Image (cartoon, rainbow, N blue to C red):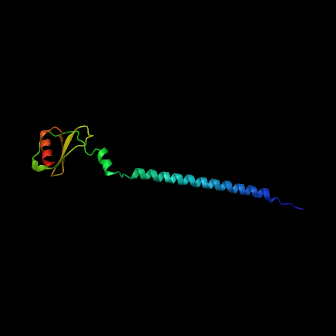
Amino acid sequence: MDRIYIGRNAKSQSQQREKNLIIISDSIMKTLCFTLGLLLLLTACCCNAMPKALQFNTVPGNCCFNVCTRSLPLKRVSSIAKTHSSCLKQAFIVQTIKGRQICYSGTFQWALDVYNQQH
């Protein structure tokens, strides 16, 4: 009589299948986590969305490093604005009608007069 031992062989096959499933699911989880992490990193790096209020309060726009000491005729001045408070030099930026931007010291009387006239 031949005896067939199914129990032992079937049990080892079942354990092997379970190990394979665990390995596969572990691999899928690692891939999924890696993909989601990469997506999050790309979103953070490529998206430059920032609330406007935060942007204006923390990021200086234009700062002046050199200032002009000659006044311009008023008819050439398009607009004038103060530099951001975090700039090293407090100054005025004058926009001409031709689009040039010229810096003037914050204590230059001509720039103070023009600023007070326009604001």
Seen from this angle, which residue lies furthest bottom?
Answer: 1
Give the left or right position of residue 22, taking residue 65 as reference. right
**Rendered position, 6 above or below 50:** below
Give the x, y percent position of residue 79. 17, 49
Number of numbered markers: 0
Q: Residue at x 15, y 45 (%)?
A: 115
Q: Position of residue 45 (x, y in %)?
A: 41, 50
- Between 76 and 36, the one lying in front of the other is 36
Q: Residue at x 71, y 55 (%)?
A: 15
In the picture, residue 5 is in which quadrant?
Answer: bottom right
68 or 21, which lies in front? 21
In what quadrant of the picture does the N terminus appear?
Answer: bottom right
Where residue 75 appears, as percent x and y from the top left, is 10, 50
Looking at the image, residue 26 sits to the left or right of residue 86; the answer is: right
Task: Report x, y in % for residue 57.
Answer: 30, 45
Which residue is drawn at the image coordinates 64% and 54% (left, top)?
22
